[in-house]
Amino acid sequence: MKNYYLISILFLFCSCKNGSDLSKKNKFSSLNRAQAIQLSSELYQKYAVDLINFRAKEIENQLIELDGYKLKYHLKTFGQMPQNGWSLFISLHGGGGVDPEINERQWNRHKILYSLEQGILLTPRSPTDTWNMWHQAHIDEILNRLLQNMIAGSKINPNKVFLLGYSAGGDGVYQLAPRMADRFAAASMSAGHPNDASPLGLRNIGFSIHMGKNDSAYNRNSVAEEWEVKLKNLKIKDFKGYNHLVKIYENRGHQISHAKENYVLEKSQNGVDSSGILWMSNFSRNPFPKKVVWKQDDVTHNRFYWLKKDQPKPYELVIANIKDQVITISEATTSNIIIRLNDNMLNMDEKVRVIFMDKEIFNDYVPRREDVILNSINEYGDPESIYFGEISVSLQY
């Protein structure tokens, strides 16, 4: 994922100009816990102000332009904002490899397809009109930028961000939810197809599938049933993860978003698949889960929860967990990894051990550093996902 360098430069300049005692420390020197917490708050606030000022036009116009792609989006607000910020529901429209006019109609229809009890419904228009319009590589980068803008400028709670999509949008949910799971609390897929997606990355979020029993095009219905089995088996092996809901609707075809059933919110225009919205709303993201299953897709990411990988390769796998002061990497198909830490995960005033293949590969103190705090803010723009220190380890079998 690309960092946004101009904001980073402004951000670094502001932090260096700050006259506080914290800013006088070398950015590589060690901080205590209180200093790290204070500094992360100060730096994020500076970042947010710079971002809002620098991106004021794109935020006002509700239009993101990145690497030649343009994504416009529609916002609709429901209810009252909770004390800790709005929930955000990103809803991906259907259509796909058809004329732009058809996709435009799909987008306009999708704006009014769902209702919420509380939250902001964000309906983006796909930047392209291809069959895979919601899971090409540029989508991940645009969504990352969109989330940065919404968190900084619209008082979004980063732990209450949800992804849903219908038809071609459902294809996108199948793909985006596993590879961007660290940005979402839960995701809901309706009437889509996963293509080559893997469910492994869904370990720490809620994931629901909604499919018409008669939706046989591209074997959507049978593939949904296969994913139900996959998710059940993952849940059996790892009972603390892989929370899921699969609903196959009898006597329904592809247009499940047009049908109503009595358990849907009263006076709502929602279809049966909107039960996924109600189910998702019960989830909150844990930005620092005790266990991480990171499976790269053909579109790669260099960060996933508290793991980081420079120059990641497609389909690499890393499984790691934290217990007390010990980090165990139980499986890895890569030769190196960066582990990021903060005091929500373990006690950084004590030594940290890293175990790989039953062998201790690290046993030392991990300093809290300004540069790590700054980098994690610049990458995601997420005040709930800031790290204080990091360990770089080599994984040799």
Image (cartoon, rainbow, N blue to C red):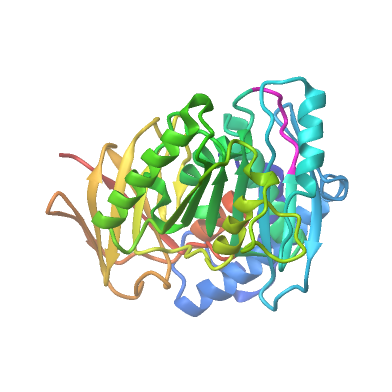
Dividing the image into 4 quarters, which one contains the C terminus?
Answer: top left
Task: Please count the marks in the image.
Answer: 0
- The foreground one among 369 and 329 is 329
- Quarter where residue 197 is shown: top left
Q: Would residue 364 appear left or right of 263 to someone viewing this image?
A: left
Q: Residue furthest front?
A: 251
Dividing the image into 4 quarters, which one contains the N terminus?
Answer: top right
On screen, 240 above or below 193?
below
- Quarter where residue 265 is shown: bottom right
Asked if residue 128 lies in the magenta stretch, the reply is yes
Q: State whether residue 378 appears in this view.
A: no
Q: Residue at x 40, y 41 (%)?
A: 225
- Quarter where residue 360 is shown: bottom left
On screen, 171 above or below 76?
above
What span is colored magenta in the figure?
A: 124-130
Q: Residue at x 63, y 55 (%)?
A: 274
Asked if residue 385 lies in the magenta stretch, the reply is no
- The foreground one among 115 and 262 is 262
Image location of residue 242, percent across then percent down? 38, 56
Image location of residue 211, percent across then percent down? 53, 42
On screen, 142 above or below 374?
above
Image location of residue 133, percent across then percent down? 64, 29
